[in-house]
Image (cartoon, grey):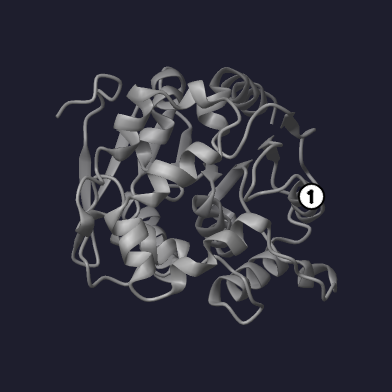
């Protein structure tokens, strides 16, 4: 099977004994782009095609995702993915990074950035999380309704059957996260599903969705707490771009990120975009990224 809209050269690097797939296109300032669940570097295909004319675009696939190795016994915790990503940046000798991140790529990327501020030149934040209410001294934590709907996937066998067997994430969850269903047409669906054709290839998707923080004791809640505390007040130039009709990343999160990162440009709010804003309104997102890089 060949993807007509994904004609980039695939590169691989060994991290902790596993092959990690990545794209490295163009020259100039480094734009490092991180995908979420259940996507892969294909999510940024249109961005790489355009931005690589002026910048060096690097887009890795996390272990278990995309064209990276997918060992069924690997540790797919976000903390383990964070460690691998840190090793990836180190092995690639990347500095002065403009970090563009979405979904869990934002949780991993912003957590990494909080501990490696000297390597980061700019942040572009796309529908993700960077903290929890406790960062502001608040005790109230109410997960979005979509988190609660996905909670049963933590149950043994049910999660395996739905995510690894039925391919729930791409067949059901992704379409529901779009405002404009036409933006997730047949070609895009084929592209997103391409590396996930078999049961064993969707293990990381399952483990990742099971980490959605429902309780304060969940490890990812604690990771976000630590990240928010470390990011708070950082003066790194930041651009937030947000699809406002996202069931998993409600607009209220924008205020949290703006408070954390006070040196931010006016947030681009997209009223008719959902979670996958890069698919629904790519031109608006690209235009804002270009503008941000050139003026910061």
Image-quadrant location for residue 288: top right
Q: Which of 51 and 179 is in front in this view?
A: 179
Please give the name of the residue rendered at 54% of the width and 22% of the height, measured from the top-left corner: 282
Q: What element carries label 1?
A: helix
Q: Which of 22 and 155 is in front in this view?
A: 155
Name of the residue lying farthest toward the left? 1
Classify residue 184 as left or right of residue 117: left
| Residue at numbered disc 1 | 252
| Residue 214 percent coordinates (x, y) | 62, 71
Graded by Cα atoms within 10 Å as few (under 14), some (14 to 19) or many (20 or more), the crowding at tag 1 reads few
Image-quadrant location for residue 42: top left
For the image, the number of numbered tags is 1
Please give the name of the residue rendered at 22% of the width and 67% of the height, measured from the top-left corner: 72
| Residue 16 percent coordinates (x, y) | 24, 67
Q: Is residue 34 visible?
A: no
Tell me if residue 51 comes above or below residue 173 in the rendering.
Answer: above
Q: Which quadrant of the figure contains the C terminus?
A: top right
Image-quadrant location for residue 84: bottom left
| Residue 55 percent coordinates (x, y) | 45, 26
Q: Which quadrant of the figure contains the N terminus?
A: top left
Name of the residue lying farthest toward the bottom? 217
Q: Is residue 21 visible?
A: yes
| Residue 254 percent coordinates (x, y) | 76, 46
Tell me if residue 173 comes above or below residue 239 in the rendering.
Answer: below
Please give the name of the residue rendered at 33% of the width and 48% of the height, measured from the top-left corner: 61
Classify residue 248 as left or right of residue 45: right
Name of the residue lying farthest toward the right? 137
Classify residue 130 as left or right of residue 136: left
Q: Nearer the viewer, residue 155 or 53?
A: 155
Q: Which of 178 and 93 is in front in this view?
A: 178
Please give the name of the residue rendered at 57% of the width and 77% of the height, measured from the top-left corner: 218
């Amino acid at each position: 099977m060949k993807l007509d809209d994904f004609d980039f050269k695939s590169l691989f690097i060994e991290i902790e004994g596993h092959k990690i797939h990545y794209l490295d296109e163009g020259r100039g300032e480094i734009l490092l782009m991180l995908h979420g669940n259940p996507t892969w570097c294909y999510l940024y295909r249109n961005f790489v095609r355009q931005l690589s004319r002026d910048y060096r675009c690097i887009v890795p696939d996390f272990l278990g995702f995309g064209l990276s190795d997918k060992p069924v016994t690997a540790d797919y915790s976000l903390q383990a993915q964070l460690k691998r990503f840190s090793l990836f940046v180190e092995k690639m000798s990347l500095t002065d990074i403009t970090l563009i991140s979405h979904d869990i790529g934002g949780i991993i990327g912003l957590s990494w950035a909080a501990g490696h501020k000297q390597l980061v030149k700019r942040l572009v934040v796309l529908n993700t999380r960077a903290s929890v209410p406790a960062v502001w001294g608040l005790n109230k934590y109410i997960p979005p309704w979509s988190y609660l709907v996905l909670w049963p996937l933590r149950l043994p066998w049910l999660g395996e059957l739905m995510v690894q067997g039925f391919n729930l994430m791409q067949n059901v969850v992704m379409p529901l996260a779009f405002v404009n269903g036409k933006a997730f047409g047949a070609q895009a669906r084929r592209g997103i599903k391409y590396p996930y054709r078999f049961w064993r290839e969707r293990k990381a998707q399952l483990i990742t969705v099971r980490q959605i923080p429902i309780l304060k004791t969940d490890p990812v809640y604690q990771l976000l707490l630590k990240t928010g505390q470390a990011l708070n007040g950082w003066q790194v130039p930041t651009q937030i771009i947000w699809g406002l009709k996202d069931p998993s990343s409600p607009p209220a999160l924008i205020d949290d990120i703006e408070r954390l990162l006070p040196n931010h440009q006016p947030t681009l709010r997209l009223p008719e975009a959902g979670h996958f804003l890069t698919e629904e309104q790519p031109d608006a997102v690209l235009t804002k990224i270009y503008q941000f890089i050139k003026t910061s």
